[in-house]
Structure formats: structure tokens, C-alpha cells
Amino acid sequence: MTKTANAVMRMTRSALLSETPIRQDTVSDHIKYQSDIAPTLLYTHDIPEISVVVRGNGIHCIFNQAIPCKEGDIYIIASGTPHAYYSSDDSDKLIVRRMFFDPADWFEGNITVEKDENYCYGVFSDDAVSAYAMLTSESREQIFMFFDLIGKEISEMSYQWKDSVRSYLTLLLITVSRYVKSAIKSVHDIHQKDWGIVSATLKYVAEHFFDSELTLESLADELCVSSSHLSRSFKKISGQSFSGYLRATRLDHSCTLLADTELSISEIVEACGLRDVPSFYHNFHTYMGMTPHKYRILKNKNKKSTEQGEKIMILMSEISENLQKGKAKIVKQLVQEAIDEGTSAEQILEEGLIDGMNVVGEKFRKNEIFVPEVLVAARAMSQGAALLKPLLQQAGVQAVGKVCIGTVQGDLHDIGKNLVKMMLEGKGFEVVDLGTDVSPETFVNTAIEQNCQIICCSALLTTTMGVMADVVKAAEAAGIRDKVKIMIGGAPITQEYADKIGADAYTSDAAEAANVAYSFVS
């Protein structure tokens, strides 16, 4: 989307706090500062923001004022204050950690009243539009500790988590208020009163933009200042005209209504305080580079695409989690649901089934789960994979590799062999199971006929270990030793024995066997 040079991007409370009552993020994709462009790329929120410069040096633009910032600087930005961060030409990329919150979600009384001197525990006691502090390494760690604790409580949502968040947020604001000083008192020669006038203007516009009678003159009367003084102050501090800002505000809200409602164009014009439909079409096209109708179609299309993507992600996560729990019936149902949603069989396999088996394999390797849990998880994977198999074949999706596996001649034990087979399938291998009591010739002939890249030999009895050496010799005699990897395992097997007979790998557990096999073909 292309906006006019005077545009300020708005981020509403609903957009920022759609999922949790506090949002945190870390941003590092700042563009290089250019004095002629920077003021045109500001953004504004209708809730406060706390931001800490984590690394680098740069420029923090507040309204039209460029303020140098560096690692350790903390800014608390009042609602309705246009600002943005930019990197400097001679520094590393600027990294800023941010937190957004609505005081009304967490506090009561004068702490939530913007005009009160105790608003946000006095951070804005001098009616500033922003507050600033230069943190020491110790105070920085303290601030980040509160960030982390708040994030942890919100993610886990344990018993009385809201009370904990309220406590940590209180401590954070009180701590910040001890360090901060006004970030705007010393900026150029702008009088503090002018900052207050502009701040009040922004807030009034945010609350009354829908009033078609709102003008520079009516607002000047409301603030008890002359319209010429208001115009000069607004232009000096914000870098744009009041009329341009008011128009951009109304058009921003029209964008929201076009995207989120089914209101007609005339209803949107009235709801945003705009003059008439023809001028709205003209101004909207100039502002957004497209007609209102095209914008609505585009946003609805993107919204449906986003909703579909989120639904698929949730489905993949549920497939993985239920597979780990061995809930075969649910896994089968979820896989079918994903297929019906149009998800590719390859994505379901990789992000759902294989992802779940990878977790199972890692837990098994760490002795966090045992053979019964692995068996039920493998059964669940088989249920889902059975639905995907014809779709994968139809789509021409290839397995990551092909393995033949069996227990060597003279040995009828198959539990270990079966576990390795499950783990291999969980990694995306096609596995040819030769069963038990398998001769060296059968291993080698199968590898040749089935084009296997790997032969896996299992043995539980000490008396059958020697057959593994015969498998290596048979592969050499058949001329495929340089084309096929031979892996061995079982209770009596050691790395020394594998080295002695010339095997390519020995592993002590099934999960590691699958990992090693994957490394051979990747």
C-alpha cells in the first residue's frame, strides 16, 4: 500500500492486543534514517508503548523531531504519539524490544487517567508525550527481568496469572518512573506548552474524527488557543498540516471499516466524518493507490488466506501432539480433516506426522518415554500415513530414502528391529521389513532389487553377531559395498565390533539409528 507523504500509520488497540492484554515483540528491520523521508513513516498507537534499545545506535523520531538513541535507552511513548526508530549509517542494525499495554486492563483509578499526574505511576507526570531514561547495565537487566516475567505469565496462564502480571507491570512502571525524564524538554527549542497542545490535538482527533464539523478552528476553540498558533505548533512538531493529518486519520479508519465491516461506502463516509462520496473516492485513491472497492476485495482475500493458514497450522500442531500421545483414532480424523481442507499430503506428513515422531524419538533417546509409548505413537502414525500414501504417490512425492531391515539369520527377536523401523518411517524413509532370521544373501539381494541405500541389521544373541560380518562380506562380493551403507545394532553390539567388521554405523538406540540413517541420505 502506498500512502501520501504526510501519512502516519495507525495501530489500534484491537490490532495490538487481539490475543493477550499485553503484547511484546522485538523489531530489528529498521530502515536507514533519512531526514526527508523519516517523518513520513511514523506509526502511532492508541495505547502506551515501552521500548528499550537492545543493540545498535540510531534515530528515534517523535513527531518531526529526530532524537539520537543508543543501546540502553528506554522510551515510554504515550498513546497517540507518532514515532518510529531508524538505524544510523555508521552503526549495526538497531534492535528494539517493545511492550504494548492498556492501563485500563490492569489498573483502576487515577493510574488509568491520562491527564492525571499519577497516570502510569507518574511516568508522564509532566504531561509529556514521551518519557526517556538511559539505563545502566544493572537497571537494564532489571527492566528485562520484568519483561520476561510478564511474558512467562501470559504464555503459561497459570493460577492467578493476571494478578502476577498486574504486580510485575506495577513494579515495571514504578521502576521506570524512577529513571525517566522528559524525552522532549531538551529537543530543539520547542516550548513544553506546544508539545502539550499537539498531544491534546492528537488525542482529540482520535476521539472525534467522525465529527464532520471538526476543523482546525473548532479544535482551537476547544483547546482555548488561536487557530494560527495551533496550526504553527502542529506543523512545527509533527511536520505536517493539521488538515492533512485529520484527513489521513479519517481515511485510516475508513480502511478499517472497509476491511472489517460490510458497511456501504456512504455509511463509511458518514462514520468517518468525511465530506461526501465523490471526494472520498478521490482522496482514498490518492491515499491508498486503489479504489475503496478494490481495497475491500483485497483485504477480504488476504483475511481468508490468513485464516486458512492459521487453521492449517493448528491442525498440524494437533496431529503432532495427538500422535505423541498415541491417539491413533484422533490422528486419523485430523489427517482426513487436513486433506479435506486442501492441505498437501507432503505438508501433513512433514509438519504433522514426522514432526510428532521426531519428538517421540528424542524423548525415547532421553529415556523420558519407553517402548510402550513409542509403539502406540507408531501405531498412530501408521493410521495417518495410510491415508496419505495414495496421495503422496499421486503427487510424486519421494521418500527421503529406502532401507531394508531385518534381524540376522539364527535370531528370532524383533522388538528392537521394529522400533528402529518405526523411527525410520517417522523420518520419512520407505522401509522394507525382512522380518527375522534373515540370511546375508537376502539382505544384499533385497538392497539390489529394491534400490535400497541402507541395510539395517539387528541381533540380540551373541551367537548371531557373526552373521553381520557375513552381510558386509556379501555386499562386497556383490559389488554394492560402495553404494550401500550398512548399519548394525542390538544388545551385544558395540562400536568396536562395528569397526572390526567394517560396518558404516552402530547406534545404541532406535532414535539415534533413524538420525544416523537420515544423515546418510541428506
Image (tube, helix red, strand yellow):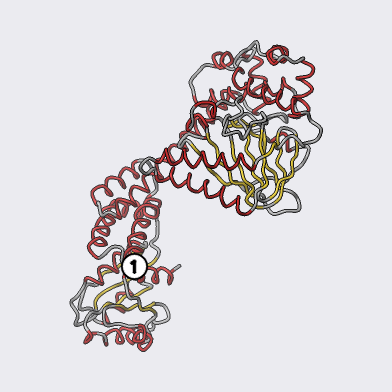
Q: Element under label 1?
A: helix
Q: Is residue 372 left or right of residue 108?
A: left
Query: On the rendered image, what quadrant is the C terminus found in?
Result: bottom left
> Which residue corresponds to the image point at 37% horizontal and 63% vertical from the top-left?
427
Compared with residue 65, is residue 355 higher up or lower down, i.e. above or below?
Answer: below
Q: Nearer the viewer, residue 65 or 385?
A: 65
> Which residue corresponds to the image point at 56% horizontal and 23% vertical from the top-left?
293
Q: Nearer the viewer, residue 297 or 108?
A: 108
Q: Nearer the viewer, residue 401 or 504?
A: 504
| Residue hosting label 1 | 365
Query: On the rendered image, what quadrant is the N terminus found in?
Result: top right
Query: Disc count in the image?
Result: 1
> Which residue corresponds to the image point at 52% horizontal and 32% vertical from the top-left?
102
> Which residue corresponds to the image point at 38% horizontal and 86% vertical from the top-left?
499
Q: Quadrant of residue 232?
A: top right
Query: Where residue 431 appears, x then y in whole percent?
Result: 31, 67
Query: Where residue 503 appears, x then y in whole percent?
Result: 37, 83
Q: Is residue 123 left or right of residue 301?
A: right
Query: Where residue 402 appears, x then y in whole percent?
Result: 36, 68
Query: Where residue 319 appears, x then y in whole percent?
Result: 33, 49
Q: Nearer the viewer, residue 231 or 145?
A: 145
Q: Amino acid at mark 1?
A: Arg
